Image (tube, rainbow, N blue to C red):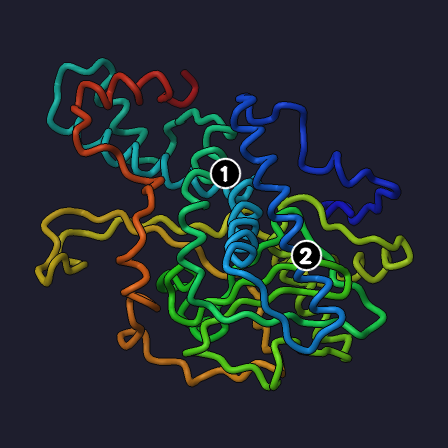
Amino acid sequence: MTKDASRVITYASVRKQCARHKYYGSTEFEDFLGSLDGNHGRALNILAANARTCENFSFCDDDRQYILEFMMLQRSRVPRAANKIAKINRQMTLTFLREILATSTTIPRRLELLAAIDNDTIIYDQDPLESIMLSMKVSLPNSQLLSDLSWAVIRNHTQLPFIFGDSPAVLYNQYLHQHHEQTGTIGYMCPGLMVLLPIGADLTLLLYDDAAYSVSSSSSVVDVVDNPIVSRLNVLQILSSVQNVYFGNQNDGEYVRELINAHRSSFRDDFTVVRIAPPGAFSVDGMPSENEILHTFEQQLPIRLNLPFLNVNPTPQINEIPTCRNEQLANSISTPDAHSHDGSLSAEQFLEEALPKIHLPNA
């Protein structure tokens, strides 16, 4: 179903959704993703079969890692991820460019460029595919940052289906939700992080920080019999998606349409916040920062989930929030930074790369 007009498209081929022949250009990269998809599909099938027939489930470390990779790829290879990367790269590029323009007097149209940056009217061309590729590059090693989270499967016994959107791996944080407008609360190492992913009309996988939550079940499977709980989880999918949501039975179309229309006022194209903190606003190695710091984070979806089977610890004050859920894990993993420029890049090299993508408004 499309989000904009709540239009049901029947008999849509699953294999043609979010896909295009040689979308990523490189045959080698396409083959690499194909090999991952095979491992991911097998691990998910094992998980789904166990969750439907057992009260507890377990599988080998490889399969667990494959599912984490799958979740991260589903979050990173979608238009919302590309938009996030593009917004952050734009702000970082313009910040660096402004610093260079402030001291260099030889760059053509320097004052016009400075004015356009200050007015936020400058145009910065970016290739969406390049942004998605960069997002995916970071996501695979980052999947290890979720390895300390506990797992549960929510088993749906209602007549309503779990639906999924075009951005199905949802990060959420009920523990710190009241602080989400002030700071990042859904970073991969944030305390209280939750990750939710539908893996069937009757199953949703939940990863959670067991230092912030406990599940009121003696097993790794949580049975749900109340329609409102299923609908709350479905609203996450609707709000996270960009264009479409999917379900298997066309008889559920009216239910999904009503859910979309009920939350239409909360739709947003972008949840990424980019702020420039003045010198001294942050501490670096225990000392006030000497320079401006670009602070980026993603706000949470505008819904309070409140799952009755999930017990939540009291929310700390914002000045008491730990900066990292698991410092030992964070320090043990080296991941590429998608948003930083190589420190060895000279001003001349930076301008050579950036200026062809920069355009003045109405130019």
The one nearer the camera, 115 or 346, is: 346
Q: Residue at x 44, y 50 (%)?
A: 272
Numbered mark located on residue 82 in the image: 1
Element at badge 1?
helix
Residue appearing at x 18%, y 52% in the figure: 278
Q: Which residue is tagged 2?
A: 264
Q: Amino acid at mark 1?
A: Ala
Residue 329 spot, x, y in % from top left: 32, 62
Query: Where in the figure is residue 88, as x and y percent of width and height?
Result: 37, 41
Q: Residues within 10 Å of mark 2 (few under 14, many from 20)?
A: some
Look at the picture and state if 294 lies above or below 230: above
Regarding residue 176, the answer to whether it shows in the image is yes
Q: Quadrant of residue 224?
A: bottom right
Within-10-Å neighbours for mark 1: few <14, some 14–19, many 20+ = many
Which of pointers 1 and 2 lies earlier in the amino acid sequence? Answer: 1
The C terminus appears in which quarter of the rendering? Answer: top left
Front-most of 259 and 164? Answer: 164
Q: Residue furthest right?
A: 251
The image quadrant that residue 198 belongs to is bottom right
Residue 21 in picture, x, y percent from top left: 67, 24
